[in-house]
Image (cartoon, helix red, strand yellow):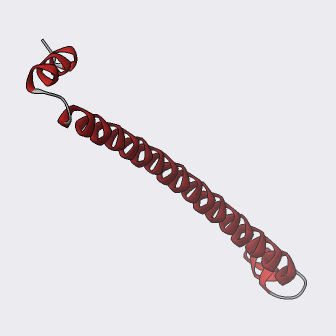
Amino acid sequence: MLDMILSLFTGGGVSYIAAIVAAVVGFIGLYAKGRSDGATKAQNKALKNALQTKDAQLEMSREATEIERETGKLADDEARREAERWARR
């Protein structure tokens, strides 16, 4: 039994062991690459969502500024009536 195991390391058996080791290392490399690509894809998706959120916030801020400028031109009574429409009760 021990002679068979030792014969794998000497002679023609070395090429089989080298092939098995190379295959295992290759599979580990492919697995790591796949996980890395998945993490990159998830990070890109999160950044895209964050960018869309910031764009929406900027648009809302612009709209609020425009409304503030319009209401600044109103008289006090008109401004109060306009504010009552939007105030929470």
- Residue 54 vs 33, above or below: the answer is above
Considering depth in this image, is 52 or 7 the residue closer to the camera? 52
- Between 49 and 69, the one lying in front of the other is 69
Quadrant of residue 78 in the image? top left
Q: Quadrant of the N terminus?
A: bottom right
Q: Could you say where residue 46 lies in the image, as x and y percent from the top left?
A: 48, 49
Q: How far from the left and from the top, in percent, is residue 44? A: 54, 55
Count how many numbered circles sit on residues in the image.
0
Q: State left or right for residue 46 relative to residue 74.
A: right
Q: 28 or 86, which is in the foreground? A: 86
For residue 7, which quarter of the picture? bottom right
Q: Please state if 62 lies on the left or on the right of 52 as rendered.
A: left
Quarter-wise, where is residue 8 in the image?
Answer: bottom right
**Of all residues shown, which one is farthest toward the top?**
89
Quadrant position of the C terminus in the picture: top left
Q: Residue at x 82, y 83 (%)?
A: 14
Tell whether 37 sits left or right of 39. Answer: right
